[in-house]
Image (spheres, rainbow, N blue to C red):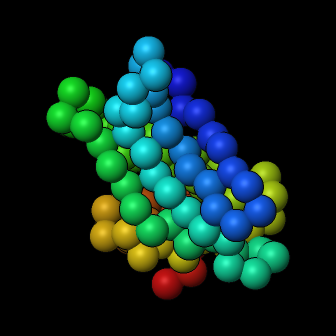
Amino acid sequence: MEIKHQENSQKGSFYVETDGTLLAEMTYSFAGIDKIVIDHTFVSDILRGQGVGNLLVDAAVSYARDNSFKIFPICPFARSVFGKVAAYNDVYIR
């Protein structure tokens, strides 16, 4: 499954689409020059239960590490994943 990424100067998203249909998405906003705020996660019923939400979080973590960002998750789903996965602590802002 391919996780795609798009961004502009203020916000971005990691997402999955098939034939132009958005099936999953995690959105974020930039907070200063070194932080992103994950504010929303959506996974369609078609993909639910397949770990796609976790893949979106993992893509955000990889992006943060590659760009020396920290992540503040205000989305309840993302916050719960960060709270459970100790390997993400290097980028996690509580």
Residue 27 position, x and y percent, is 50, 57
Residue 29 position, x and y percent, is 60, 68
Give the answer, above or below, for where 61 lies relative to 50.
below
Q: Nearer the viewer, residue 4 or 83?
A: 4
Give the answer, above or below, for where 92 lies relative to 22.
below
- Tell me, yes or no, if residue 78 can be seen here: no
Q: Nearer the viewer, residue 17 or 64?
A: 17
Q: Is residue 17 left or right of residue 93?
A: left
Residue 80 position, x and y percent, is 32, 67
Write the residue at 25% across / 37% down: 44
Write the residue at 40% across / 62% down: 40
Q: Nearer the viewer, residue 89 or 61?
A: 61
Give the answer, above or below, for where 63 lies relative to 79.
above
Q: Is residue 87 left or right of residue 31?
A: left
Write the residue at 79% across / 52% down: 66
Write the residue at 37% across / 55% down: 41
* Res 55 quadrant in image: top left
* Res 53 quadrant in image: top left
Q: Is residue 69 left or right of residue 21?
A: right
* Res 59 quadrant in image: top right
In the displayed orientation, state which residue is furthest to the front. Answer: 20
- Tell me, yes or no, if residue 12 can be seen here: yes
Residue 18 position, x and y percent, is 42, 19
